Amino acid sequence: MIIAPSILSANFAYLGDDIKEVTSSGAQWIHIDVMDGVFVPNITIGPLVVKAIRDITDIYLDCHLMISQPERYIKAFADAGAGGITVHAEATNHLHRCLYMIREHGIKAGVALNPSTSLDTIEYCLDMLDLILIMSVNPGFGGQVFIDAVIPKIIKAKEMIIGRNILLEVDGGVDTSNIRTLHDAGIDVFVAGFSIFGSPDPGGAVREMLKIKGSGLDI
């Protein structure tokens, strides 16, 4: 179980302190949501912030590019210190080429799918993938409510990657009320923003999530 706190919900005035708190409490990745105001209706950060984070930690930086034509910025984020780059299947006309470009930089390649996007979209790119990110909210803003309809999609995705070295990640509305069900459905990496950084004790929130063990699906 990998907990990947999303800095989208962190306090940017104290970003370094927030990152140190959650990583010292057991978070294995830091999730970085990059938005361009085009693919999604919000604007966040760029490679300079990723570089600043890399300068204070050696933790895996999970860069999620919610931007149009992500191939234009792969080199910049790789050079800034990304451990892996995830692009949206909906955001590029040439997904296979985009994934190849990421791998050329020696980092992990991931693809994200919006809630209504079919898994069929990535059927012919599985050999290029290290990670599949299932969006459980419509991307663009933190603090949204988890869309329960994606749980069967997660189960199907897990079946699709049996025998492959591909991690399954979920992003959107993840908290202690649903993390057990998601764990049982096959999720390896849990992105959580508001439920961690919106808590008065972000480190404690991470520790609580790490205590969760699977106990059977209730769908």
Image (cartoon, rainbow, N blue to C red):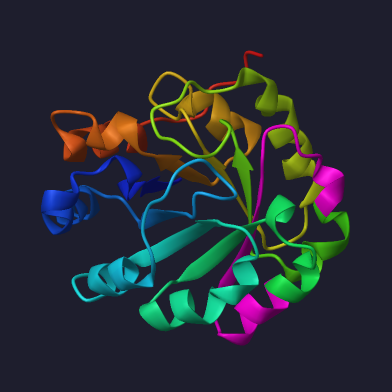
Does residue 90 lie above or below 58 as drawn? above
Which residue corresponds to the image point at 56% horizontal and 85% vertical from the top-left?
105
**Percent of width and height locating residue 153:** 74, 32
Query: In front: 53, or 68?
Result: 68
**Foreground residue, 209 or 97?**
97
Q: Is residue 107 visible?
A: no
Q: Position of residue 60 (x, y in %)?
A: 38, 66
In this rendered view, identify the residue nearer to me: 10 or 183.
10
In terms of depth relative to the viewer, which is nearer, 8 or 191? Answer: 8
**Which stretch did the figure color magenta?**
99-121
Q: Is residue 73 above or below residue 165?
A: below
Left/right of residue 182 with respect to residue 163 in the rendered view: left
Q: Quadrant of residue 77?
A: bottom left
Q: Position of residue 28 (x, y in %)?
A: 35, 56
In the rendered image, the quadrant that contains the C terminus is top right
- Residue that lies at the very extreme toward the top in this rendered image: 218
